[in-house]
Amino acid sequence: MTTNSLPLFYVQPRPLNASLHANLSLATAQGFAYAAKTNAVPLVATELPTACRHFPIVFTDGPQPAPVAVLGVRAGENLFVGADGKWREGTYIPAYIRRYPFIFTENADRSQFTLCVDEAAESVVEGRDNPFFDDAGEPTALARSALEFCRDYQNQHAFTTEFSAALAEADLLIENRADITLADGQRLALSGFKVVDEAKFNKLPDETFLRWRAHGWLPLIYCHLLSINTWPALINQLQPAAEGEAK
């Protein structure tokens, strides 16, 4: 993996290996400071029913759109991570964030995946308190759980990619932007994302609608549309942050 191709958050991912990582552990008190400066993260399909109650869900621009959770309006600001690195209580934590510092990497023909860990993560520490491997060099419950989590995530990612591609092929995604005016008159704008055109969606041919229903895609569209109602709550979180900066 080159630096340019590294996914969000990851700096130095390497295949999890007993000879390399025998004396490494996952810090038990890890927080979410690593996510504090990102205002959007990817979502997979199974998350949308829960995520739609907590954040706006939009689609990335470009030839391969994907659903993302909007976590902030300004660049470099995540309104769900506090100064102490803790996630906002009572709100959903996206799987992409919970997966870190683990990740799957794929071989050239995408037929095989390898569990990796970001060696640069602050949560990866020396010691045997919460190790990746036991004294015999076998993966611990932590490593096995990480493998299962990443496997499930990868499967859902593939399903989500197929869903998003269908939206694009049907020309249902349109460019959008969020224009926000704070109480002090400050104006903010978030652009570069797409949403489902509800009018076009309602005019889908019956054959397409039934096929999408069979694939399980219709609830995902409804979750996306429902999530638009969370913009005011996101902006309400922004307001105290802006007031704090002014003091």
Image: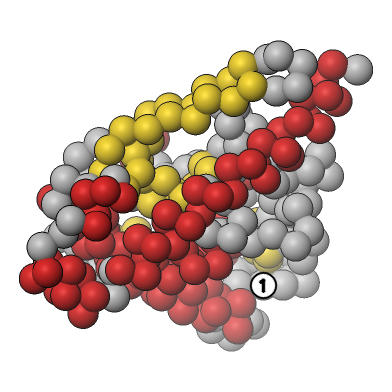
Position above or below: 172 against 178:
below
Residue at 35% over, 61% down = 221
Q: Position of residue 195 (x, y in %)?
A: 35, 44
Q: Residue at x 59, y 25 (%)?
A: 180
Local secondary structure at mark 1: loop
Residue 181 picture location, percent across and down = 64, 22
Q: Is residue 237 above or below residue 93?
A: above
Residue 191 in view (yes/no)? yes
Q: Which class describes the residues within 10 Å of circle 1: few (<14), some (14-19), or many (20+)?
A: many
| Point 49% across, 30% down: residue | 178
| 21 or 74: nearer the viewer | 74
| Residue bearing the label numbered 1 | 131
In what quadrant of the picture does the C terminus appear? Answer: top right
Colour logic: secondary structure
Classify residue 154 by image quadrant: bottom left
What x and y, as percent, mark residue 133? 59, 76
Q: Specify the quadrant of the image occupied by residue 131.
A: bottom right
Q: Is residue 177 left or right of residue 240?
A: left
Query: Which quadrant is home to the N terminus?
Result: top left
Left or right: 41 as drawn, with respect to 78:
left
Number of marks drawn: 1
Regarding residue 69, the answer to whether it shows in the image is: no
In percent of width and height, residue 26 lies at 68, 64
Type of amino acid under label 1: Pro
Left or right: 126 as drawn, with respect to 8: right
Quarter of the rendering containing residue 82: top right
